[in-house]
Image (cartoon, rainbow, N blue to C red):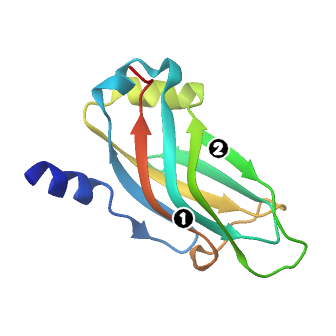
Amino acid sequence: MLRSLFVALLATAVLGATERRFTVGIPASARSPAHTQIVLEEVQLPAGEPVRLIVVADSDSVALAEAAIPGISSARSGTQRLPRLRLPLSRAGKAQIESRRDSLTIWIRALDAHRKPLATSRWAVKRVRIEGPPR
């Protein structure tokens, strides 16, 4: 039960104006980061426009992972929901995972097609975790 509480506390999001912050645990399986991924769960994005999600660590400007998600509707309204989005780590992301012990604080930024930040009122990520290669 304490472990569940600890994990829940680590994955609690703190909302900002244009980015979301999460503290995630680093599982032992991620210590070999060849196939380690950052997994975003319950993602909500604007349906009518492309969005680029960028994951950075400790307010660093180097991306740990990123993904471009196309808009799914020609209408400029509505929301697209993705149950899970798996992002492979960049080289910088692999180095960050290797240099950390138990946890990592990450920020997720969402940008529009013109690389301008989207307000957090327009997008959401419910949970984030780091996943090592399958055993």
Q: Residue furthest left?
A: 2
Query: Is the residue 78 above or below the residue 114 in the image?
Result: below
Residue type beneath disc 1: Glu
Task: Using residue 53 as the reference point, say whether residue 101 is left or right of it.
Answer: left
Mark 2, secondary structure of its residue: strand
**Total numbered labels placed on residues in the image:** 2
Q: Residue 7, how many percent across, how many down?
A: 23, 51
Could you say whether the residue bearing mark 1 is in a helix, strand or loop?
A: strand
Give me the disc on residue 66: 2
Q: Earlier in the sequence, mark 1 or mark 2?
A: 1
Please tell me the numbered disc located at residue 88.
Answer: none
Q: Nearer the viewer, mark 1 or mark 2?
A: 2
Q: Residue at x 85, y 70 (%)?
A: 73
Q: Is residue 33 above or below residue 41?
A: above
| Residue at the image point whose x is 58% and y is 24% from the top | 91
Q: Quadrant of residue 15?
A: bottom left
Q: Residues within 10 Å of mark 2 (few under 14, many from 20)?
A: many
Quadrant containing the N terminus is: bottom left
Image quadrant of residue 9?
bottom left
- In 3D space, how far apart are the residues under numbered discs 1 and 2 (Cα atoms)? 14 Å
Residue highlighted by disc 1: 19
Between 127 and 93, the one nearer to me in the picture: 127
Q: Is residue 113 above or below residue 129?
A: below
Look at the picture and state if 96 lies above or below 10. Answer: above
Residue 81 visible at all: yes
For the C terminus, give its image quadrant: top left
Question: Marks 1 and 2: CB-CB under 8 Å?
Answer: no
Mark 2 belongs to which amino acid?
A: Glu
Task: Say whether residue 62 is visible.
Answer: no
What percent of the width, then of the height, locates residue 125?
51, 63
